[in-house]
Amino acid sequence: MESLGPSPTLPAAEEITLSYSSRSLLAGGKVFAIPEAAISTEERDSWALIEEGFTLAREHEIESLFAIGNGYVGNRGSLAEGSPLSAPATFAAGVFELSPTPGSVPGFFVLPDWTGVRAWVEGQPLSMEQGQILEHRRLLDMAHGVLWREWRHADVNRRITRVVALRLASLADRHLLVQSVVFTPENYSGQLRLVTSIELPANVQASPPSERYKARRSATRPNVLPLALRSPGRDVTVAFGVASQLVAIDGRHAGQREIEITDRRITERFTVHADIGAELRLDRLIAIYTSRDPVEDPIESAANHVNRMLPAGVPRAIADHTAAWEARWHDGDVIVEGDEFLQRALRFSAYHLISAANPEDDRTSIGARALTGESYKGHVFWDTEIYMAPFYCLTHPPSARALLRYRYHTLPAARAKARRAGYQGAMYPWESADTGEETTPSFVIDPGGKVIPVRNGDLENHITADIAYAVWQYWNITGDDDFFLSGGAELMLETCRLWASRARREADGRYHIRHVIGPDEYHEDVDDSAYTNLLAAWNLQRGAETARILAERWPHVWKEHAARLQITPEEAASWTGIAGGMYSGFDPATRLFEQHHGYFNLEPIDLAAYEPRHAAMDVILGHERIQRTNVVKQADVIMALYLLWDQFPAEVREVNFRYYEPRTSHGSSLSPAIHALMAARLEDPALAEKYLRQAAEIDLGNNMGNAAGGVHAAAIGGLWQAIVFGFAGLEFRPDGLHFAPHLLPHWRRLAFPLQWRGRKLRTWIEPEAFGIHLEEGTERVRVSLAGGAAVEVGPQEQYVSERRESGWGEWRKLKKEF
């Protein structure tokens, strides 16, 4: 054990509080106070999740919902002192582990708990399990990306201690984590002992500091403590640098600090005499670096990072972090006046989407549960491109670009998968992790203990077209030619080639794609999935268009691509023909797409007869039987209608939605939001509201029953899309933006920002008016309304159109801020 005396010099605590009205940190309030009666309940609740009391059985669920993150690192909202059901977990994006067990697939590497703070009052532990909880609440301040906790506790001797804590993962400095805890003895004076520790799990190898670092450490700040480990099976080094300080609120150092440090553990112990009513604050700065980062030594980088932060300390880190959140909310906040629950759900969605993306790292993507839980092992699905990417494209293009560059960097693995399957081009994995190789497990065990083979990795090939769709959408929205030329075009060409080799022309003269799984995963190994074939045809058309655009606008780039990828003129010319000849399953008589070959002959199931339902239909009917029924797991044909909206007449969209909607069981969290979007576009407000509410409650109401595994990142991305593309009716046209608003009757106002080809716009919609403002940008934007006229909006100009009985009226230019 080593005693270092006073802890490293940090500035005195600044008096800061949170204000939800201004959404900024203000000076002059009580330190780290949670806003109370001065803030209206409606305003507070729209920006905060509040969990009153403590319910042990809900702890894993709460840890997911109250998670913090910045795209580089995420941390679940567990209790600092732990509980019987606490499962603290921190994840670093792109850092996976792999078990040596044959058949294992990589999964998220759970980092050591850096949040652990345990306290003793006169030798008695401050614990939720002993004594009496007088007050307890957790508050996730979504406006500032801060997790708060307030706890008043009476121990067995009736000594009452108040604890107020905050925790954040800095959005301004993605390597930095901050924790601060204030202890106040309310009715006693006595000894307070605090212990913090970070310890490596027994099965994890330590990564000791280099001799160079050890030699230099004593010459810098010896109180900055290092700890490093390696991810099993992947050998990625993850390094922590830690500095802690216990001070009285007047800024004086408090008590003595001892540390115990080995290659496997950091322990800090503080002992202080606490006077009645005197507040003591424990501040902690933690830096994280990994060997994935472009640094020579992660351990040294982590320690140096903390050293740089020490002079300004926790208050400066909080201020920078909240300023970064302020900027992101300015560009991403959707406002719905007249629906308090939906407003909070939309901010919850945007909060977790912002927390999940890192524009500074284009070799990682976002897993199905982001950085909030271990479900799906952190693997990346089509969720990212189809459900999340639109949010980033329209609110923070650098994040969208980084996510799509991940797919470009993993193109070699997709090419290798295609070759192994006997195809050309690139076949993307259904699940991927760090390398881009297929990581779908080969089997799962159902609730009855039966082993069920998982075939998605081989057959759910539509993800290749989904990725191409997202690449094209990003380029269309942003006009980012550099992205297109430095990877996007190549990805479009290689995905196109996959479908050209995957589809086979048969005796009927049509091209067929056999042995696939569509979005409706209840039906495996089917032929001619309508969704797969329609998206494949779209991919082929865009591949041909990519070749034409390159040849016309950037002939030198096309020449280089054609030579390197060995694309002949005959091959490129064939893509349009294959797309046009693709079998779609469309019946002109009924105007229905058959979801897959033979679907119309399956056993009909009346889903209404199974309501109220507390389990998924595949659990109720069983894995084998459900494949013989017409029950649809999630939006499938309906999803294709949404993505390829302009390809279908209005009557085809309507007929197919009305046919498949009552047959869809929503066994996936991805489904309700898309049904809400489509119902809104088809002007069915009652059905749209039903599905919108269902989508909003997936995490906040835990209506899927599995929020403990992490938030449903695709579902929250889908909720945002339902509002922007469904109820606001946003469509992208070759000449600009088009809106077809369909507000719910009780909404007073819908407003949101969006970015389009280098411009920032703000739009607001009321029952009788539609407004648009070009906030940033130098070029005009064409905006049109369904049933109304179009307008060219210039820089800093604002226009409004008012609803008339016959549609929307002429645009009127405003002279002042709306």
Image (spheres, rainbow, N blue to C red):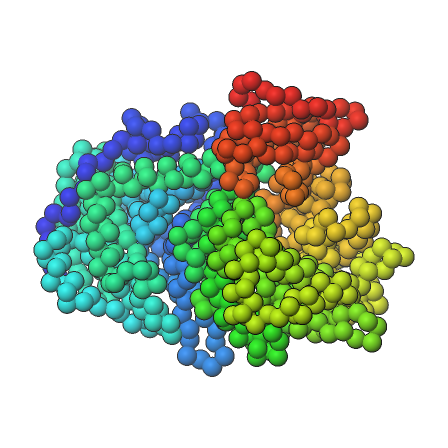
Q: Nearer the viewer, residue 373 or 716?
A: 716
| Total numbered labels | 0
Measured as percent of width and height from the top left, residue 60 is found at 46, 55
Answer left or right for 51 relative to 571: left
Furthest residue in direction bottom, as rendered: 102
Report the quarter where the C terminus lies: top right
The residue located at (80%, 48%) in the rendering is 649
- Which of the 4 quarters of the picture holds residue 383? bottom right
Q: Is 780 rendered above or below residue 598?
A: above
Task: Specify whether residue 539 is in view.
Answer: no
The residue located at (47%, 81%) in the rendering is 102
Task: Specify whether residue 801 is in view.
Answer: yes
The residue located at (25%, 48%) in the rendering is 284
Measured as percent of width and height from the top left, residue 485 is found at 51, 56
Q: Nearer the viewer, residue 604 or 351?
A: 351
The residue located at (48%, 66%) in the rendering is 410
Measured as percent of width and height from the top left, residue 10 is found at 18, 42
Q: Is 458 rendered above or below residue 63?
A: below
Answer left or right for 618 relative to 484: right
Report the quarter where the N terminus lies: bottom left
Measured as percent of width and height from the top left, residue 657 is found at 77, 51
